[in-house]
Image (spheres, helix red, strand yellow):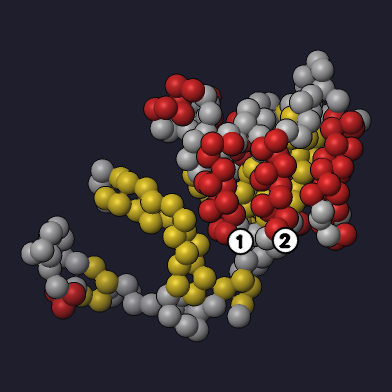
């Protein structure tokens, strides 16, 4: 068993409308994903028409960013209680969670649900008190409520030792100290790298992958999204000259091994 020290897998969990997808937008901009961030739009991960119409996340989606030599894989999850099954399924893909809590509303019912599921899997938590720019923000009281929620759920002693950041997702800023105004999301990125453990891997056995989601693309067709646990090291790469769909598909013998 070996460790991929250059990878971090996280899920962003929270109650509905606490700013998960907006924070993902800011993280993508911070990582320089877009050539022109001003043209990227908002709620980039919500591509489903119903999600756009209602302004909520319904289906869990994943993306990845490169940060300071690390690959951070991010799973954006639904916050509505009706789609809690999506959260339970994708938590098996990650090694830690970002728990977002609104600085005015505090922990709400879905916050309890997603946190309990994460603690049951002993996933480390990075707590983010979001929307601290609200006029009715009360971040210190909300942090006390989060601690009380951990205890009420029945967490283990080591799970209470979690990092806390204060953020304004819409502005793309975060800080570890309320007295110091954040300028970007570097503190959040650094906290992910420091506190989310490296994923284990094994390249000595047959390929094994836990599929958690199914996507579709008009060009490549159906896409399986999941987490790879076992992979064969130095697998040969094959190209197929002519791809034929259906029962008359070209046999594997028609493939030729790639050179170089």
Q: Quadrant of residue 22?
A: top right
Question: Are the two marked residues, 1 and 2, in contact with CB atoms closer than 8 angstroms?
Answer: no
Q: Earlier in the sequence, mark 1 or mark 2?
A: 1
The tag on residue 122 is 2
Q: Nearer the viewer, mark 1 or mark 2?
A: 2
Q: Quadrant of residue 80?
A: top right
Q: Residue at x 48, y 33 (%)?
A: 46
Task: Please name the residue that numbered disc 1 is placed on.
Answer: 7
Number of numbered callouts drawn: 2
Please tell me which residue is depicted at 39% across the width and 27% down the height of the picture. 49
Farthest left residue?
Answer: 248
| One can see residue 21 in this view | no
- The quarter of the rendered structure image containing the N terminus is bottom right
Q: Residue furthest bottom?
A: 204
In percent of width and height, residue 177 lies at 88, 37
**Where's residue 101, x and y in %?**
74, 35
In the image, 128 versus 106, the foreground residue is 106
Kindly identify the residue that appears in the image at 57 percent across and 43 percent down: 84
Farthest residue toward the top? Answer: 135
Local secondary structure at mark 1: strand
43 in relation to 222, above or below: above
Q: Is residue 221 left or right of residue 227?
A: left
Q: Helix, strand, or loop for circle 2?
A: loop
Q: Position of residue 123 (x, y in %)?
A: 70, 58
73, 141: nearer the viewer: 141
At horizontal 82% and vertical 22% (from top left) the residue drawn is: 137
Q: Taking the image as drawn, is residue 87 in sight?
A: yes
Image quarter (top left, top right, bottom left or bottom right) of the C terminus:
bottom left
């Amino acid at each position: 068993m070996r460790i991929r020290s250059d990878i971090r897998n996280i899920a962003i969990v929270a109650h509905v409308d606490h700013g998960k997808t907006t924070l993902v937008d800011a993280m993508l901009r911070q990582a320089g994903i877009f050539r022109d961030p001003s043209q990227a739009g908002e709620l980039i991960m919500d591509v489903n028409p119903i999600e756009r119409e209602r302004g909520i996340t319904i289906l869990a989606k994943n993306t990845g960013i490169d940060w300071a030599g690390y690959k951070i894989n991010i799973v954006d999850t639904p916050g509505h209680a009706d789609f809690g099954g999506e959260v339970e399924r994708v938590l098996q893909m990650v090694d830690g969670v970002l728990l977002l809590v609104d600085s005015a509303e505090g922990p709400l019912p879905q916050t309890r649900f997603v946190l309990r599921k994460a603690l049951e899997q002993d996933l480390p938590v990075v707590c983010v008190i979001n929307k601290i720019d609200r006029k009715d923000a009360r971040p210190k009281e909300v942090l006390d409520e989060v601690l009380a929620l951990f205890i009420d759920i029945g967490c283990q002693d080591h799970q209470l030792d979690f990092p806390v950041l204060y953020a304004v997702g819409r502005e793309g800023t975060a800080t570890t100290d309320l007295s110091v105004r954040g300028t970007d999301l570097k503190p959040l990125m650094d906290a992910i790298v420091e506190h989310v453990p490296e994923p284990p891997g094994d390249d000595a056995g047959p390929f094994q992958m836990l599929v958690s989601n199914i996507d579709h693309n008009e060009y490549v067709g159906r896409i399986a999204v999941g987490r790879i646990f076992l992979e064969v090291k130095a697998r040969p790469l094959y190209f197929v000259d002519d791809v034929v769909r259906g029962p008359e598909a070209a046999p594997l013998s028609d493939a030729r091994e790639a050179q170089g």
